[in-house]
Amino acid sequence: MQGSTRRMGIMTDVHRRFLQLLMTHGVLEEWDVQRLQKHCYKVHDRNATVEKLEDFINNINSVLESLYIEIKKGVTEDDGRPIYALVNLATTSISKMASDFAENELDLFRKALELIIDSETGFASSTNILNLVDQLKGKKMRKKEAEHVLQKFVQNKWLIEKEGEFTLHGRAILEMEQYIRETYPDAVKVCTICHSLLIQGQSCETCGIRMHLPCVAKYFQSNSEPRCPHCNDYWPHEIPEVFDPEKEREAGISKSNKRSLRSRQH
Amino acid sequence: MKVEAAAVADACSDDLSCGEADIDPSLLELVDEEKCRSIRKQYRQLIYNVQQNRDDIVNTASESLTEALEEANVLFDAVSRTREAALDAQFLVLASDLGKEKAKQLNSDMSLFNQVAFCDFLLIFVGLNWMEDDGRDALSDCDDNIVRSFWETVQKEATSWMLQAETFHFIFGSFKSEPSARKPRLEHRKRVYRMEENGDMPTKLRKLDLCSNQEATEKEVERILGLLQTYFQKYPDTPVSYFEFVIDPNSFSRTVENIFYVSFIVRDGFARIRLDQDRLPILEPININHVGEGNDSSSHCRKQGVISLSLQDWKNIVATFEISEAMITNSY
């Protein structure tokens, strides 16, 4: 084990409770994370000042480093909401024994992942995924079962389903980015702005560069004539709005009612 | 009878002293045949009753076994011959068997778990006690929603009694082996396998099923099979391009119907779909004589495939393949 670059922090019950809560949910939005952090302080250490979220999480990460687990911060590809996910970083003999999903279910996820990466829009249709069910490793799976498994993935926040098509959830992107870059180096798409993995986004029709929707929003913010940063052609797609947590809280829009303002465009 | 008895008595007095041998003189009297027959009848009745009510006696905490034993006791007082005694012995064996079963059921453990009672309580807790009236068969008939709601209610209550921390869920790192070599990306977006009609077809095709009734479908399939076979006879050994065959450049709905009918032909084994060297699907004849090709007959019932064709896809295909007229002519 290499020497830790971070000085190992101290975990109190506040941190432990927070970590267990995050472990239960898998992935949470930032406002939820802040609320939970305050809740953990209230339960265990009423009088202490609430540590800044970033330092709080870095503290926990320094302790988890030796286990190859990390709390990663990311941004949802369609909305630009900041999310935090607890991800696994290494393939070890122990991680291979994970029993959340059976061998054929994992293979289905892998094949769906491949289809999503290969697709133009970042979405793979359920028919195409189901057509590959015959080639799965492990126990033979019927197509009806495969539909249930895909729903299980959606429930556990590994995939997102939209109008019969599937794409990767922010959680999966945070966890699998390294794997995707290593396994599909030729097919992987990258955002020109932030240089991280791109599944959904907008692309320039002339030069083909791609950008995440939130990256587009930030880059072309209050720009009346958006132009491609690479070829300077007029940017043909609708520019989404930058995600503003304050505005959303004021409007009191509940998550379930909020319709996506962005269209899935390419 | 009397003479015999007297002779026995004499014999007794000769060989053994009467005082030692405990033979009750009343036993040696003439026995009433009628009485014996009625005793035997009563014994048999008793044995029959006990056997019929076996379950009752063993499972309920009733006095019926004791009562039966007492009845047998009373009967035995009147028994004087071996024949009845044998019946009494038979009854005794039966009664002691039942007694043993009852004793086994005695609660000698400190905590006894009665599964049946627990199940009843569970159903009452979940609010499904209406099921008890219908009998146990109702349990197997109830649909998924009831089952799911049952387990959710139980879970809500049970989790509050169990202190359990959630485990760490992840996907990365759980793949057991290295990913297989990547297949070259297809230029043509559609992958076609042998198709088989089944309930998992996408809604598009299912709706079509409702439009045409069974007979019309079969007639159409036969007609198209005839067209296909005519083509194969005219041009032997040349498989026809699948899309050229099914696409009707003038009507999208006819195209979809054609795909539907051709899938029946493939399912019934009159033709097969393959990909040629350009990775485009082609239709090939299967001669009925060639059933001996082992692989095909076994594998063609296991493969399933789904085709999705949008209006745009259809237009693209018509343009790409330059299809000017439909190969499958209309029957009307």
Image (cartoon, coloured by chain):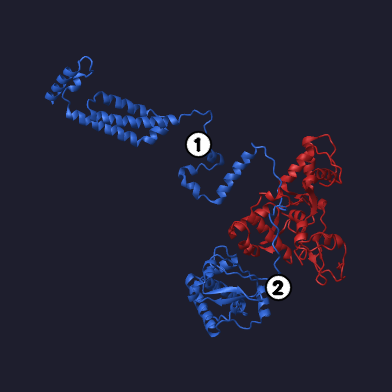
Chain colours: A red, B blue
- Label 1 lies in what chain? B
Q: CA distance from mark 1 to mark 2?
A: 65 Å
Q: Secondary structure at mark 1?
A: helix
Q: Residues within 10 Å of mark 1 (few under 14, many from 20)?
A: few
Q: Would you place residue B264 above or below residue B41 in this image? A: below
Q: Would you place residue B243 above or below residue A88 in this image? A: below
Q: Looking at the image, which is closer to me, B225 or B271?
A: B271
What's the residue at 22%, 17% (across, down)? B21
Mark 2: which amino acid? Glu
- Residue at the extreme front: B15
What's the residue at 56%, 51% (across, down)? B144
Evaluate if marks 1 and 2 touch, with contact meaning CB atoms under 8 Å apart.
no
Q: Residue A248 location, x and y as percent? A: 79, 52
Answer with mark 1 or mark 2, whichever residue precedes in sequence.
Answer: 1
Q: Residue B168 location, x and y as percent? A: 71, 46
Residue identifier under label 2: B187
**Quarter of the rendering containing residue B193:** bottom right
Mark 1: which amino acid? Ala
Residue identifier under label 1: B117
